[in-house]
């Protein structure tokens, strides 16, 4: 199933999130780590601060495992909508924002 996802980033944890996305620890998570990393690379931050992305998930409850293991630590107000086709999301790349936060939080 393909979902359009929107959420608010917990900015105090942005640097940690970048580290975990780039050090391989999230990618190594089974069964969904690589999809989480790919989704965050697609994610964009809108002018209202909302992060939007698409993500594939086969859980009976959308993003259940992803939320329990990663997403709920770094985002609030997560909403999902089942979609048929991936659509482009506009805004600043989330990874750039996370990288900037990582640099300033060190």
Image: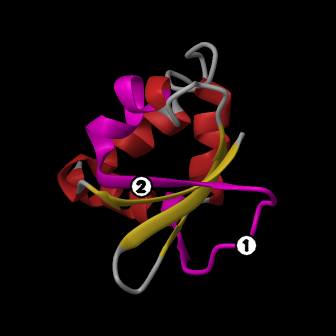
Residue that lies at the very extreme toward the bottom in this rendered image: 47
Q: Is residue 86 magenta?
A: yes
Of the numbered discs 1 and 2, the one sitting upstream in the chain is 2
Return the residue nearer the eye: 35 or 24: 35
Q: Give the residue number, with chain letter if any, for mark 1.
A: 88
Q: Residue at x 24, y 46 (%)?
A: 13
Report helix, strand or loop for mark 2.
strand
- Circle 1 SS class: loop
Which quarter of the figure has residue 11? Answer: bottom left
- Taking the image as shown, residue 8 lies to the left or right of residue 26, namely left
Q: Residues within 10 Å of mark 2 (few under 14, many from 20)?
A: some
Residue that mark 2 sits on: 79
Residue 58 coordinates in the image, percent (x, y): 67, 27
Residue 16 is at least partly visible in this image: no
Which residue is depicted at the point 58% across and 37% down? Answer: 36
* Highlighted magenta segment, given as a residue range: 66-95
Percent of width and height locating residue 56:
69, 40
């Amino acid at each position: 199933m393909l979902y359009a996802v929107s959420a608010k980033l917990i900015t105090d944890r942005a640097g940690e999130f970048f580290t975990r996305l780039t050090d391989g620890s999230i990618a190594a998570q089974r069964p969904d780590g690589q999809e989480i990393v790919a989704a965050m690379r697609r994610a964009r931050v809108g002018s209202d601060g909302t992060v939007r992305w698409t993500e594939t998930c086969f859980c009976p409850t959308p993003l259940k495992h992803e939320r329990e293991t990663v997403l709920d630590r770094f985002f609030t107000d997560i909403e999902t909508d089942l979609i048929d086709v991936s659509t482009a999301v506009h805004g600043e790349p989330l990874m750039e924002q996370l990288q900037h936060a990582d640099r300033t939080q060190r």
